[in-house]
Image (tube, rainbow, N blue to C red):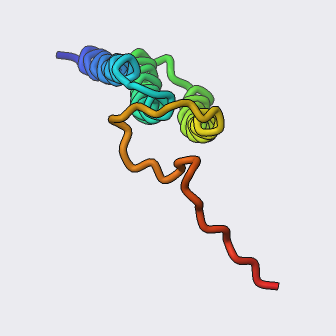
Amino acid sequence: MSAAEVGGVVAGLLMLLGSLFFAITAIGMLRAGDAISRVNNLSPATGVGLPLIILGAVVHDLTAGDLTALDGVKAALSIGAALIVSSVASNMLGRAAYRSQTQLDPRTVGNALEPFEELEQPKHDE
């Protein structure tokens, strides 16, 4: 087996594994009972699935001899941007889900943000 064939197999496996994370996330989102649980289910796809697919594309280009330094920088920036954007988006989606005050699924445990529960206010030193 040549290096190009091995690289093609590795690239394919990385992309399949990344796709598997997206499929598992989709199934989890269908099974989730409320918006907050659905926001939490996005993490495997955006945190692991997307970087694996991008790495698979990089490995494929590398073994085909088409990878340039600029392509490597683009891939690294894409992975970094995806991680940053997904964490900010998850925070905003979770906040919007909480502020809509919809009923949570009974299977959702540990709700410290219950509307009837007083949270401690930070004390400001003056």
Which image quadrant: the C terminus?
bottom right
Can you give x and y, in whole percent of width and height, for residue 53 in the image? 42, 22
Q: Say whether residue 49 is left or right of residue 2.
A: right
Asked whether residue 84 appears in the rendered view, the answer is: no
Quadrant hosting residue 87: top right
Q: Is residue 26 left or right of residue 96?
A: left
**Residue 2 in which image quadrant:** top left
> In this rendering, is residue 114 above or below 105?
below
Q: Pinpoint residue 70: horizontal percent, then vertical percent.
A: 62, 29
> Quarter-wise, where is residue 1 in the image?
top left
Q: Residue extending furthest right?
A: 126
Position in image of residue 86 (x %, y %): 57, 34
Q: Which residue lies furthest to the left in this view?
A: 1
Q: Which residue is drawn at 52% across and 48% down?
A: 114
Give me the residue at 54% from left, 38% from top: 83
Q: Point out the residue furthest to the bottom here.
A: 126
Q: Which residue is drawn at 46% across and 29% down?
A: 42
Percent across and percent down for residue 78 are 58, 31
Residue at 50%, 17% (x, y): give it: 66
Residue 98 visible in this rendered orientation of the protein: yes
Please name whichever residue, 38 or 56, is drawn nearer the observer in this view of the structure. Answer: 38
Q: Nearer the viewer, residue 57 or 81?
A: 81
Instruction: Count the numbered circles shown.
Output: 0
